[in-house]
Image (spheres, rainbow, N blue to C red):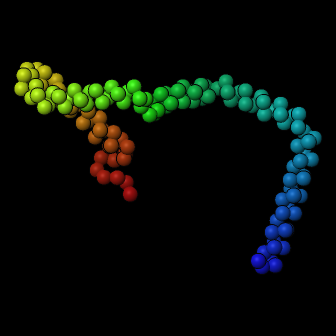
Amino acid sequence: MNISKVTNNLKRVRLLQTIAGAYEITLNKNKEILSKIILEKSNRVMQSDLAEKMRIARRYFTLEMSPPSNHELKILRQDIDLVWKFIEQQSYTHLTVKQAFLLFLVCTEVGLWFFMGETIGKMHFVGYKV
């Protein structure tokens, strides 16, 4: 290791120790006053409207963004099996026009959720901003 690097590091360490010592003296003198001020400020922040809105947003976030549970995955698997049976047995040939139209509308709605979500996500109608 270079000697100049070692001396520079020692100088930095001494400077940091000096600064830390100065702050320690100041903090020791005003420790009670600072702790009271910090406590008052934190209480005001915790009672603010923004804090309440953030708590509500956190609850929604943890609810909506949590991964699916085992029970939900079992239900999804049952639904997928039901759709496969519907297709394999050609049950769609027995649908009325109204039922077929409603299924078409539901599929269209899900497709639009995807495309509108993509449009909102990229914040642009054509292509991504690069």
In this rendering, is residue 76 above or below 2?
above
**Residue 106 visible somewhere in the drawing:** no
Residue 130 visible somewhere in the drawing: yes
The number of callouts visible is 0
Residue visible at 87% across and 58% down in the picture: 17
Q: Is residue 1 above or below residue 106?
A: below
On screen, residue 83 versus residue 123, left or right, reads left
Image quadrant containing the N terminus: bottom right
Give me the residue at 14% from left, 31% from top: 87
- Residue at 88% of width from left, 37% of height from top? 31
- Is residue 78 left or right of 11 when viewed as pictured? left
State the image quarter where residue 42 is shown. Answer: top right
Q: Tell me where residue 104 appears, x and y as whole percent.
A: 16, 29
Q: Nearer the viewer, residue 77 or 109?
A: 77
Figure quadrant of the C terminus: bottom left
x and y percent of residue 18 in the render? 89, 58
Q: Identify the image quadrant of residue 27.
A: top right
Q: Residue at x 59, y 25 (%)?
A: 52
Residue 129 in picture, x, y percent from top left: 37, 54
